[in-house]
Amino acid sequence: MLRTRFTETFGVEHPIVQGGMMWVGRAELAAAVSQAGGLGIITGLTQPTPQALREEIARTRDLTDKPFGVNLTILPSITPPPYAEYRQAIIDSGVRIVEIAGANPATHLPYLKDAGIKVLHKCTSVKHALKAQQVGVDGVSIDGFECAGHPGENDTPGLVLIPAAARELEIPMIASGGIADARGLVAAMALGADGVNMGTRFLCTAESPIAHAVKEKIVANTELDTKLIFRTLRNTARVADNAVARQVVEIERGGGGFDDVRELVAGARGRKVYEDGDLDAGIWSVGQCQGLIHDIPTCADLVARIVREAEELIAGKLAGSIVEAVAR
Ligand SMILES: Cc1cc2nc3c(=O)[nH]c(=O)nc-3n(C[C@H](O)[C@H](O)[C@H](O)COP(=O)(O)O)c2cc1C
């Protein structure tokens, strides 16, 4: 059993979280991860309205009685969604865990804490993790440069970011970005993390509600097959290397701004990729760890495999190599 400060604080069996994923974090996936003993997370904004989120939470509850969370991604936006209403839907539905990402969680925190909700904040720097600790979150999830989605602008990979954060933080911390198997989990724990958050790995599971062609593409892809878009806008996103991502990078290189790529990066186009399996319909988030993914398991098999292999690694290979090194 891998018990950590994270499993204790958040009341889950295994220190494995399925991070919020736009268009993907629906009831089927979150429930499957939670049923497997991990922490499944529904993505709030995937639902078109706060009422639809209430219904999605109820649907998740029908599928599992284990704890699950809701992600609220509060990225700065010209026309922001009604965050407060989404937050209220989460509170009214009796959800016990919320993942906040995208900006300082301080505005939402008092409402969530008053409702007795455990809050995990996802960020990409030690500075922001410390800020989140200071404003009172219960844990942080810290995303290294390898991650899918928004890695921030510091380009610090997990191998450095995780121990740097572990040195400063007092609350439980989970490592995110680039983790797809037991080796990643054990390494993250050796670096000082209390568990892991995985996006890409759970994107490529049987219960992930996306077209099979996308999962097959992830299996076929290597660690080299991602692109960083929006670098010039200082809003970097790691996405799959496809015709649209290459076009966006080209436009940025030529001095183009957001208006020049707006149509290419539209959310509706990205959604088409997941729904129809048309891999060049738009941009779609994926991390470098796709190079470590070679199958499409159920969440139950995946979580059980990661936990079993992590325990074997710790008690077997690593313990053995320490003995060997001492003996030599
Ligand atoms: C398809 C996809 C969509 C994502 N959408 C969101 C999102 O809406 N909000 C968020 O906080 N993180 C989002 N992420 C990031 C993940 O929650 C997680 O932090 C990241 O995938 C970790 O890196 P990994 O893919 O290497 O495991 C997304 C990731 C993927 C793969």
Image: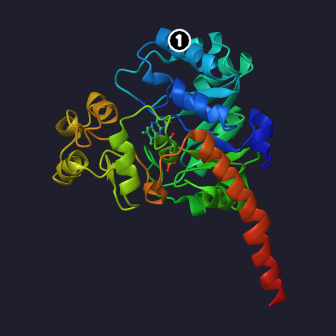
Residue 164 in percent (x, y) is at 65, 59
What sort of colour scheme is used for the picture?
rainbow
189 over 116 or under it: above or below: below
Q: Residue at x 25, y 48 (%)?
A: 245
Q: Quadrant of residue 327?
A: bottom right
Q: Horizontally, is 171 left or right of 112 in the view? A: right
Residue 103 in percent (x, y) is at 51, 34
Q: Horizontally, is 74 left or right of 165 in the view? A: left
Q: Residue at x 44, y 44 (%)?
A: 150
Circle 1 SS class: helix
Q: Nearer the viewer, residue 200 or 238?
A: 200
Q: Nearer the viewer, residue 115 or 34?
A: 34
Residue 315 visible at all:
yes
Q: Quadrant of residue 226?
A: bottom left
295 over 163 or under it: above or below: above
Residue 110 in percent (x, y) is at 68, 20
Q: Residue at x 76, y 63 (%)?
A: 314
- The amino acid type, in three-letter code, at marker 1 is Glu
Read off the residue under disc 1: 55
Q: Horizontally, is 216 left or right of 66 in the view? A: left
Numbered marks: total: 1
Residue 154 visible at all:
no
Q: Residue at x 31, y 46 (%)?
A: 230
Q: Nearer the viewer, residue 299 or 144?
A: 299
Mark 1 closeness class: few <14, some 14–19, many ≥20 residues within 10 Å: some
235 over 113 or under it: above or below: below
What quarter of the picture does the C terminus occupy? bottom right
Residue 139 in percent (x, y) is at 69, 39
